[in-house]
Amino acid sequence: MSNYTNNLESKLWATCNELRGNMDASEFKNYILGFIFYKYLSEKIDLKLTKELQMDRLTFEEAYNKEEYKEELKNAAIDDLGYFIEPKFLFKNLVELAKLNDEDLVINVERAFKKVTDSVIGQESSDDFQNLFSDVILDSPKLGKEVSDRSRLIGKILTHLSGINFHLDDDEQDILGDAYEYLIGKFASDAGKKAGEFYTPQEVSKLLSKIVTIDKTKLKSVYDPTCGSGSLLLRVSKEANISNFCGQELNQTTYNLARMNMILHDIHFKDFDIKQGDSLEDPQFLDQTFEAIVANPPFSAKWSADKKFLDDERFSAAGKLPPKSKADYAFVEHMIYHLDENGTMVIVLPHGVLFRGSAEGKIREHLVYEKNYLDAVIGLPANLFYGTSIPTCILVFKKCREINDDILFIDASKDFEKIKNQNKLRDEDIEKIFNTYKNRLEVDKYSHRASMDEIKENDFNLNIPRYVDTFEEEEPIDLKEVVSELHKINEEMKEIDAELKKYCDELGIDAPIFE
């Protein structure tokens, strides 16, 4: 990581710490990430339009003051960037108002946000920009009781951010995107149980992304049905060129964050499609399949399990529905439905999916034996995820497996680094898992390729210890050596007692010695 990246990240986080006050991290993130995003939009449009006006020897602001340029500038920005910001509402001009201690600053910021979303009405980019700033609640009493109080706090945030150079003119887009991801991760670590709603640790995302892109440098599409902040989708793009990003997110606030994250990572609005809603109950991509699918869904979440889903193509083939109390296999079946015939799907789930019986047992047998979709089971360390300490596993599914293909089991539960209260996969841990999976290696006490006959003998119970024996025999105890050591300790105690009695006699007290 470059010094510039480290410097940018530390400056952004320092701003958060200085200005957050008593506001909860999960709330304050909406403000700081929203303002960073608005600063990016402002600098992006200012830079682009000023560059296009070089031949006219005009800046964006100068040209916009001339009536003959206004409509052309707006159309050019919306066609290419998907949005428009009037010069007076550019971030740098809002900062000038903040420096003047404008008591109505917060009202002007609110107008600026509305102008951006109004500019996309009826445009192709409408779905990607509508209501993006709805969680930056500028009339919240937590920012201050009066408009002037809120303006003062917002002014501090804007002024601090104005001093941080995003270097958009230096092709540093990836660095700014990584810094944004860094902030999302820092907020996740502070947010406790709420973090699981919007963030997958980068180390886990890296592993999933490497697996789903094996031997591929280009992917026509990637999909995440529980996309959170979009970090997992974006991580896949570090391993392969992605033509189209698709995702669905239930939480409105996190849905907004995912769209911001895409735009800030310079993913063109035509190249991503993030929808809001429940992927199981209200799927938004039913007519599409994807070459790569990744997900870290909420573990053992509840769902309706309505009988109508027995007629739904996503769930009907197994003949049973996952229980209301645990939607894990509902997500698995939903994702498999959307998987291309030559595609790969990876999903993080709790260990219970490997062995729970009843309806889940029947669905597991259907997917493993009747369909032969399961390619690998990878056991991860406990306490990797924010908000839960339970051990998890990765399931890898493919539709193109041959009848005689084995299933690879990997027990990576003991390979990690402990950092404070959180466990973390190291680069060497990720590489070990990845290389073992890619080459389907059998490693003593680490991995095993199980035939379908083995799986069948275990009644389709996929619990990893049934296939990977990690038992370590203890060295035999030398009893003579133990007795000798006890005698030695006894002699040392006698010497200590004698020394202690000597000092107690000098003090005229009884020595605390017990025979």
Image: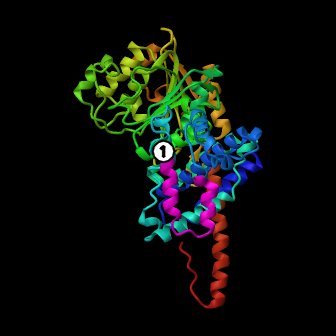
Residue at 29% x, 32% y is 323
Residue 175 in the image, given as x and y percentages of width and height: 69, 43
**How many marks do you count on the picture?**
1
Task: Out of 490 and 321, give the one closest to the viewer.
Answer: 321
Residue at 54% x, 40% y is 381
Compared to residue 306, the image places residue 171 above or below, namely below
Which residue is most to the left?
Answer: 307
Tell me which corner region of the image, top left, top right, bottom left or bottom right, holds residue 238.
top right
Tag 1: amino acid? Thr
Residue 425 in the image, given as x and y percentages of width and height: 61, 41
Residue 132 in the image, given as x and y percentages of width and height: 48, 45
Which residue is most to the top?
Answer: 403
Task: Out of 64 and 295, give the one closest to the viewer.
Answer: 64
Instruction: Say whether residue 505 is magenta.
Output: no
Instruction: Say whether residue 93 is magenta.
Output: yes
Residue at 43% x, 18% y is 455
Which residue is most to the bottom?
Answer: 508
Judge the density around disc 1: few (<14), some (14-19), many (≥20) Cα neighbours within 10 Å: some
Residue 453 in the image, given as x and y percentages of width and height: 44, 13
Label 1 residue SS: helix
- For label 1, the residue is 117
Quick check: 140 left or right of 37?
left
Task: Out of 464 and 318, give the one closest to the viewer.
Answer: 318
Quick check: 76 left or right of 305?
right
Write the start and end of the magenta stretch as one range: 88-115
Compared to residue 209, the image places residue 136 above or below, namely below
Residue 82, visible in the rendered structure: yes
Tell me which corner region of the image, top left, top right, bottom left or bottom right, holds residue 320.
top left
